[in-house]
Image (tube, rainbow, N blue to C red):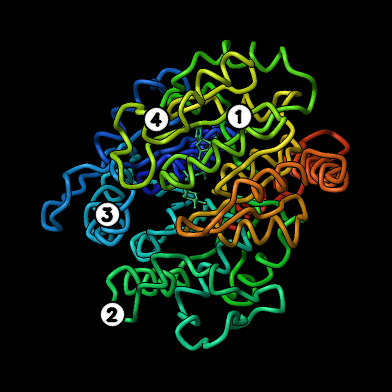
């Protein structure tokens, strides 16, 4: 069997949005008969082991201690932590350098002195390149985001260009015209940050350390994301590979963390009753949420729109994300009862089987915060987007979807924008109504492009399939 003695070390950041593409990559490597060592903190490994027992694949899990007590943080990071603590965990991750070095050394000992073929670390862990190289091991950075979104995010944090802008727009350094950013697209964390902000210092240092690596992997598609890929190829001077879309099946994904709060059969049965392409799906990803007044306007718009919908609701901004559903405070009186009586909408508290919903023939459009996993999923199933990005790379992913992929209309940006009920209904109609034919057709074209990238057939091998092979030739 080819590759059976080769092993590859994968080390993602401790969040669901990062686990998903890393596990999808692990499954590809497993199919190619590489042994995978998936490194993470004890609690995350414990959770993953429940679902991916050692007997079920050649993915092995290795624990790394992450003592965050010096940083005044809870000892472990898991997906149920409040979103606003995440940057502080990210800033603390360079303290993992020594434990990772020890772990790599132990792994080499366990393998009788044989080094891993490659270490692939999260884009937050640029420092892992130095550790891998100390042992003479090939190292790759894996960015689970898209090319254009990551390129904008990188350039923004490296240059902080918004500080020199006195108008409404500015052009990102080293970008063509497509890198023109409106001030409302500066991510909230960055608009408040200056040069001495700890997260800025962390990210700048981290992005500089990327250049010590041997290459960059992006969870995107070569044919679709040319601008972002070109940016990094020019900037970093080492190979950049597009290996996406790396997505997990619904079944495997539910194993990585949160479980759907609705029985997926019940959800699919509800969709089965609806006409093809007649349902709007609304979700703001795994961590984000909108404020109560925006939630109220969205609910009123859904009431006045003629469209069917599925809405994943979680507590609005300012409420504990784990708190129980308190509809009266966030939704118009009688909203849930009305939609139930009319069988017009399905409200799911906290967590839905998103992939199964997007794959269903009744789904016509997606109001999304444009987190990259959601973007890949919606493109894979040819569902056009009504973008409502909240922060981070989402603002640039939305820009990419509108201007480059042309499968999205933007509804709003961030949590402070003023939106009217009428504007929401208009945007829904723009995508789901008669005038949305163009955008719907484009979404089908993009769907083909995204599916082709991972086609591996005798007479057709997609660009991402070929890229994965190139990586291992480079690593040898
Ligand atoms: C985070 C960052 O917010 C985002 O900017 C970055 O691009 C990726 O990491 P997240 O908010 O988790 O993203 O959103 P997204 O990338 O869309 O990932 C969410 C995942 O959870 C998707 O795979 C989605 O299918 C899944 N999900 C979300 C569900 O299965 N059910 C839900 O109810 C909500």
Neighbour tally class for label 1: few under 14, some 14-19, many 20 plus, Cα within 10 Å: some
Marks 1 and 4: CB-CB under 8 Å?
no
Q: How many numbered discs, if any? A: 4
Q: Residue at x 63, y 26 (%)?
A: 357
Q: Earlier in the sequence, mark 2 or mark 3?
A: 3
Q: Residue at x 78, y 46 (%)?
A: 430
Which residue is tagged 3?
89
Horizontal side of 24 relative to 386 (left or right) equals left
Distance CA(mark 2)–CA(mark 3): 18 Å
User: Residue 242 location, x and y as percent?
Assistant: 65, 54
Residue 26 showing in the rendered view: yes
Q: Quadrant of the N terminus?
A: top right
**Residue at disc 3, CB closer than 8 Å to ligand 1:** no
**Residue at disc 1, CB closer than 8 Å to ligand 1:** yes
Q: Residue at x 75, y 44 (%)?
A: 450
User: Residue 57 location, x and y as percent?
Assistant: 48, 24
User: Residue 440 location, x and y as percent?
Assistant: 82, 42
Q: Quadrant of the C terminus?
A: bottom right
Mark 2 or mark 4: which is in front?
2
Q: Which numbered disc covers residue 387?
A: none
Q: Earlier in the sequence, mark 1 or mark 3?
A: 3
Q: Secondary structure at mark 1?
A: helix
Distance CA(mark 1)–CA(mark 2): 40 Å
Which residue is tagged 1?
355
Which residue is tagged 4?
257
Neighbour tally class for label 3: few under 14, some 14-19, many 20 plus, Cα within 10 Å: many
Q: Residue at x 60, y 74 (%)?
A: 181
Q: Secondary structure at mark 4?
A: loop
Marks 2 and 3: CB-CB under 8 Å?
no
> Residue 307 lies in what quarter of the image?
top right
Q: Secondary structure at mark 3?
A: helix
In this view, 48 is above or below 284: above
């Amino acid at each position: 069997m080819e590759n059976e003695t080769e092993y590859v070390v994968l080390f993602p950041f401790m969040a669901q949005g990062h686990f998903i593409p890393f596990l999808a990559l692990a499954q590809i490597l497993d199919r190619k008969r590489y042994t995978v060592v998936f490194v993470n903190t004890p609690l995350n490994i414990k959770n993953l082991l429940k679902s991916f027992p050692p007997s079920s694949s050649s993915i092995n899990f290795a624990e790394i201690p992450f003592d965050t007590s010096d940083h005044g943080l809870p000892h472990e990071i898991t997906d149920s932590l409040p979103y606003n603590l995440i940057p502080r965990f990210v800033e603390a991750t360079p303290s993992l350098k020594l434990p990772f070095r020890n772990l790599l050394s132990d792994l080499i000992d366990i393998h009788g002195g044989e080094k891993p073929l490659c270490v692939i670390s999260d884009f937050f862990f640029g420092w892992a390149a130095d550790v891998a190289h100390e042992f003479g091991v090939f190292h790759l950075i894996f960015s689970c985001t898209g090319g254009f979104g990551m390129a904008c995010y990188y350039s923004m944090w490296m240059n902080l260009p918004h500080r020199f802008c006195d108008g409404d727009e500015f052009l990102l350094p080293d970008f063509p015209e497509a890198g023109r950013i409106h001030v409302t697209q500066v991510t909230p964390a960055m608009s408040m940050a200056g040069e001495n902000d700890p997260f800025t210092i962390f990210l700048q240092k981290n992005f500089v350390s990327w250049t010590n690596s041997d290459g960059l992997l992006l969870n995107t598609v070569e044919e679709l994301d040319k601008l972002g890929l070109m940016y990094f190829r020019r900037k970093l001077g080492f190979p950049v590979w597009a290996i996406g879309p790396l997505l997990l099946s619904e079944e495997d994904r539910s194993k990585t963390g949160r479980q759907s709060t609705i029985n997926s059969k019940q959800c699919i049965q509800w969709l089965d009753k609806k006409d093809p392409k007649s349902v709007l799906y609304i979700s703001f990803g795994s961590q984000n949420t909108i404020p109560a007044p925006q939630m109220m306007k969205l609910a009123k718009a859904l009431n006045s729109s003629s469209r069917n919908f599925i809405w994943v609701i979680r507590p609005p901004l300012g409420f504990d994300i784990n708190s129980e559903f308190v509809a009266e405070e966030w939704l118009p009186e009688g909203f849930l009862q009305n939609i139930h009586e009319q069988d017009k909408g399905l409200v799911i508290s906290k967590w839905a089987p998103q992939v199964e919903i997007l794959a269903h023939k009744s789904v016509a459009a997606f109001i999304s915060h444009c987190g990259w996993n959601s973007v890949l999923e919606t493109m894979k199933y040819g569902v056009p987007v009504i973008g409502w990005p909240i922060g981070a790379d989402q603002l640039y992913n939305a820009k990419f979807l509108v201007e480059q992929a042309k499968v999205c209309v933007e509804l709003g940006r961030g949590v402070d924008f003023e939106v009217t009920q009428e504007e929401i209904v208009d945007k829904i109609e723009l995508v789901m109504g008669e005038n949305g034919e163009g955008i719907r057709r484009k979404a089908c074209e993009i769907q083909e492009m995204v599916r082709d990238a991972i086609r591996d057939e005798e007479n057709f091998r997609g660009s991402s399939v070929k890229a994965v092979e190139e990586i291992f030739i480079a690593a040898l």
